């Protein structure tokens, strides 16, 4: 091979690599779904969050009822069930977060009217997720406090300071309400598209 044919081969290989790299970068930055599909996925995740939030409300009411009747073991069992339900809620919110990221990527492709609606809906979603983070932190506190009380009851000892379970439950219920209000506001906005 002469020097000129080696140069041609090197240039061709370099062009193939450059074109391949550009194609790869475009594919990575391309959203996984189109705007209508992403909005549908977000709506489905919202529906799942609403259903799980209602399940959480029921479990909190059950815990409170057992606790007020001094049925500490039953309250603890329900608190453990609530932890599992909160984990499902958290997992669903993580899926929603991924879908929101995809929606942000396709925002420039939307008309300005639709973009404004989607941006506002995303703000409601983000606010709901922030409340969910705080709500989720309470699951350990609630279970731990009821558990401490249950252990003391089993051991036949009294606690110097009885945890304020009703206040913890009230704070969790308030956070659930805020989550649901924001999710519902986002759902209402998405319905207008």
Image (tube, grey):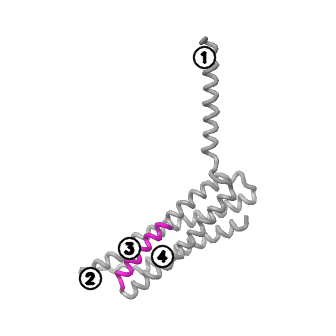
Residue that numbered label 4 is attached to: 171
Which of the image's four quarters has the C terminus? bottom right
Mark 4 closeness class: few <14, some 14–19, many ≥20 residues within 10 Å: some
Q: Position of residue 124 (x, y in %)?
A: 62, 65
Chief secondary structure of the magenta portion: helix
The first of marks 2 and 4 along the sequence is 2
Highlighted range, magenta: 71-88
Q: Position of residue 188 (x, y in %)?
A: 68, 70
Say which residue appears at 64% left-offset and 70% top-offset.
185
Please identify the quarter of the rendering in which residue 151 is found. Answer: bottom left
Residue that numbered label 3 is attached to: 143
Residue 143 is left or right of residue 110, and the answer is left
Give the distance between the C-alpha atoms of the residues marked 3 and 2, in whole angstroms.
18 Å
- Residue situated in front as seen by the camera: 153 or 87: 87
Q: Position of residue 122 (x, y in %)?
A: 63, 61
* Farthest front residue in view: 1
Name the mark nearer the viewer: 1 or 2. Answer: 1
Name the mark nearer the viewer: 4 or 1. Answer: 1
Please give the label number shown on residue 6.
1
The first of marks 1 and 2 along the sequence is 1
Secondary structure of the residue carrying numbered label 2: loop
């Amino acid at each position: 091979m002469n020097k000129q044919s080696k140069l041609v081969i090197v240039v061709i290989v370099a062009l193939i690599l450059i074109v391949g790299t550009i194609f790869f970068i475009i594919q990575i930055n391309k959203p996984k779904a189109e705007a209508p599909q992403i909005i549908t996925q977000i709506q489905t995740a919202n529906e799942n969050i609403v259903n799980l939030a209602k399940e959480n409300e029921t479990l909190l009411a059950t815990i409170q009822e057992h606790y007020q009747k001094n049925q500490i073991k039953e309250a603890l069992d329900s608190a453990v069930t609530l932890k599992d339900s909160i984990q499902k809620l958290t997992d669903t919110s993580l899926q929603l977060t991924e879908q929101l990221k995809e929606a942000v990527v396709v925002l420039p492709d939307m008309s300005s009217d639709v973009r404004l609606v989607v941006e506002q809906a995303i703000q409601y979603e983000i606010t709901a997720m922030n409340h969910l983070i705080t709500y989720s932190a309470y699951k350990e506190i609630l279970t731990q406090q009821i558990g401490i009380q249950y252990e003391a009851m089993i051991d036949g000892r009294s606690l110097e300071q009885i945890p304020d379970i009703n206040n913890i439950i009230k704070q969790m219920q308030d956070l659930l309400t805020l989550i649901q209000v924001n999710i519902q506001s986002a759902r209402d906005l998405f319905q207008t598209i």
